[in-house]
Amino acid sequence: MISDNARRVLTALAVSFCASSANAQDELTLSTRTLDALVHVVAHEIGHAVLREFDLPVLGPEEAIADDFATVYVQLMFPDRAEAIVSARADQDLADNEETEPFSEYIDDDWRAGRSVCVLYGLDPERYAGLRDRYGMTDDDASNCEDLAPEVGRSWRRIIANYRMPESVRVTEAYFAGDDIPLTTLIVSSQLSEDAGAMLRAIDWHSQITLAVEACEGSGGWSRNGRRITICDTYVERFERQLGQ
Ligand SMILES: [Zn+2]
């Protein structure tokens, strides 16, 4: 584990660059597609957080529920960019292409990709019509998505409405933290940081939620004890290999 001393706490508005990080950072870049896909990843973790923090019933596979939350929330928060965000995440899932074991809590990557595309398309078929060609949806597929997505969207919007922070209220309950690695600096100064901040600040949390970029093996995760969303640097690097130009 990383010691607290090694962890720099950063806020989205007060970012300090140390010289060594700035030099190493010159070699690091993140494509727009990686940053977009990570918006959906952060939204997925916020989905777990919303379920747990507000004691919502988990009436199905939680990973699938969190994915649906992510798609609906991204569409709610960033309607003009939702197609780019969801398609970047779907393409990353398709690149991973992992199949799960029968008793796993996780779900197959190709199903995750298809489901997110299906839900976003079905939430506004005219606006997101580009997804049909991009993912080879048949007329039957499109009509299936147009049937199921409004129910998913309506369900989540009604639940989220109970916990939305009024726009006039200044929020202090969302913090960014990170290990002292160049990737932290890069992400904190990126559009992803702004997007993640906007998504976190739109919820009226019980107490402070932290979003952290850490040097670790793994993916993203929500820790209920620490009220912390963690994104591992190796996960981000994998996205960049799969989605970067
Ligand atoms: Zn999850």
Image (spheres, rainbow, N blue to C red):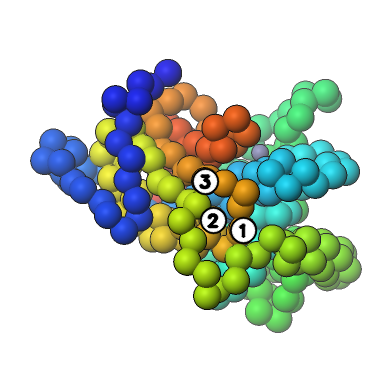
The image quadrant that residue 22 belongs to is: top left
Residue 16 position, x and y percent, is: 21, 48
Instruction: Tell me the kind of residue under disc 3.
Output: Gln
Q: Which residue is mark 1?
A: 204
Instruction: Tell me the kind of residue under disc 2.
Output: Leu
Mark 1, other Cα within 10 Å: few <14 / some 14–19 / many ≥20: some
Q: CA gap, disc 2 to disc 3?
A: 10 Å
Sequence-wise, the earlier of marks 2 and 3 is 2
Q: Which mark is residue 200?
A: 2
* Residue 89 in view of the camera: no
Q: Which mark is residue 110?
A: none
Q: Is residue 35 above or below residue 133?
A: above
Q: Is residue 148 above or below residue 67?
A: below
Q: Is residue 44 above or below residue 190?
A: above
Q: Nearer the viewer, residue 223 or 33?
A: 223
Q: CA gap, disc 2 to disc 1?
A: 9 Å
Asked whether the residues under the numbered discs 3 and 1 touch, taking CB atoms below 8 Å apart as contact, a structural biologist would say no
Mark 3, other Cα within 10 Å: few <14 / some 14–19 / many ≥20: some
Q: Quadrant of the N terminus?
A: top left
Residue 183 position, x and y percent, is: 31, 40
Q: Which residue is mark 3?
A: 208
Instruction: Tell me the kind of residue under disc 1.
Output: Asp
Q: Residue at x 35, y 21 (%)?
A: 3
Residue 213 position, x and y percent, is: 41, 38
Q: CA gap, disc 3 to disc 1?
A: 10 Å
Depth-wise, is mark 2 or mark 1 nearer the camera? 1
Tell me the element at label 3: loop
Mark 2, other Cα within 10 Å: few <14 / some 14–19 / many ≥20: many
**Within 8 Å of ligand 1, the CB of disc 1?**
no
